[in-house]
Image (cartoon, rainbow, N blue to C red):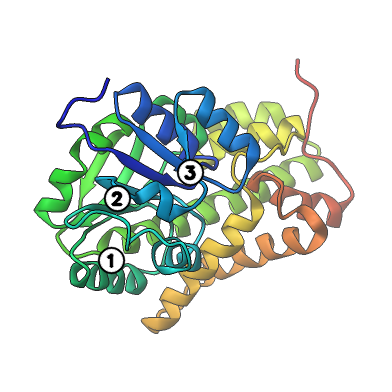
Amino acid sequence: MADKNTPVVAFVGLGSMGLGMAKNLLKHGHKVIGVDPSAPAREAFAAAGGTIAATPGEAAAGADALIVAVVNAQQVETVLFGEGGSVAKLRQGGLVMQCATVPAGFAKSLGERLTKSGHELLDAPMSGGRARAESGELTFMASGSAKAFASAESILSSTSAKVFRLGEAPGIGSLVKTVNQLLAGVHIATAAEAMALAAKAGADTRAVYEVISASAGNSWMFGNRVPHMLDDDFSPLSAVEIFVKDLGLVLNTGHEHRLPLPMAAAAHQLFLAAAGAGWGRLDDAAVVKVYEQAGDFKVSSPKK
């Protein structure tokens, strides 16, 4: 049971990471009202003890905090300020915790708008994927006022292993997430390229994976994504289209600051090629299929 110090939480976006996050809030005694267009997501949330609402506004009515875990800035805008939106229903002084990957400038302007409407913003994009969302071990890159952090304390402690407090200004968290996504996208693309080279040149790809995992060339993304390639299993935990979007955001940020980002641009082209070939909804590790199709080979290898 939630006590008087545990905020009632409206949660919009019960997707790959949002559902796990919402379920952990329930486990830690929060009352959570969830919204998502996906019937399976709603059913899984309800089975965990959550309350379903039809619209973001309905979910936010009477809530102390609103978590927005959607795909992009346009969706955040619609959730908060669109028809049936939630800001008008959220109590005065209530917290908006923005967890989507959005431009830093958008997050900054969002903070200014919410201040005018009498609400707090914690700009808190997250990282860790579905598994860490389920285990309550997400990493948050967060910026906001001391009051916003205080309002989010029980939410963050219920869902995270690490919270980086990056400053008081909304937008800093989103900028750091943009940097993270540059690295994540490039690491996935280069992992695919490395495994493609190994396969095309005739190496045992499972042996290569074991060697690299214990060597200086390893990365978190290599260790996490290459098993998908080896198993030829691209059931979506993330998706190719996510990195089409996120690396696009990275490149736009570089353009804004007149900084060339050739590595990110090359990785973006690979994800675009994968999406254009019809693999956009597959797991982001499916970017390896661009190489496989071009070279008429497979990275996958039978388990020994």
Helix, strand or loop under label 3: loop
- Residue sitting farthest toward the top: 304
Point out the frontmost of discs 1 and 3: 3
Type of amino acid under label 3: Ala
Q: Tell me if 132 is positioned left or right of 43 in this view.
A: left
- Secondary structure state at the residue bearing disc 2: strand
Q: For the residues marked 3 and 2, what is the alpha-carbon distance in whole angstroms? A: 28 Å
Within 10 Å of the Cα at label 1, are there few (<14), some (14-19), or many (20+) other Cα atoms? Answer: many
Which residue type carries mark 1?
A: Gly
Q: Earlier in the sequence, mark 1 or mark 2?
A: 2
In front of the other: 262 or 185? 185
Q: Position of residue 196 (x, y in %)?
A: 73, 46
Q: Is residue 191 above or below residue 244?
A: above
Could you tell me residue 228's position as x and y percent?
68, 34
Foreground tag (3 vs 2): 3
Of label 1 and label 3, which has the lower sequence position?
3
Mark 2, residue position:
141
Q: Which mark is residue 171?
A: 1
Residue 217 visible within the image: no
Residue with the mark numbered 3 = 53
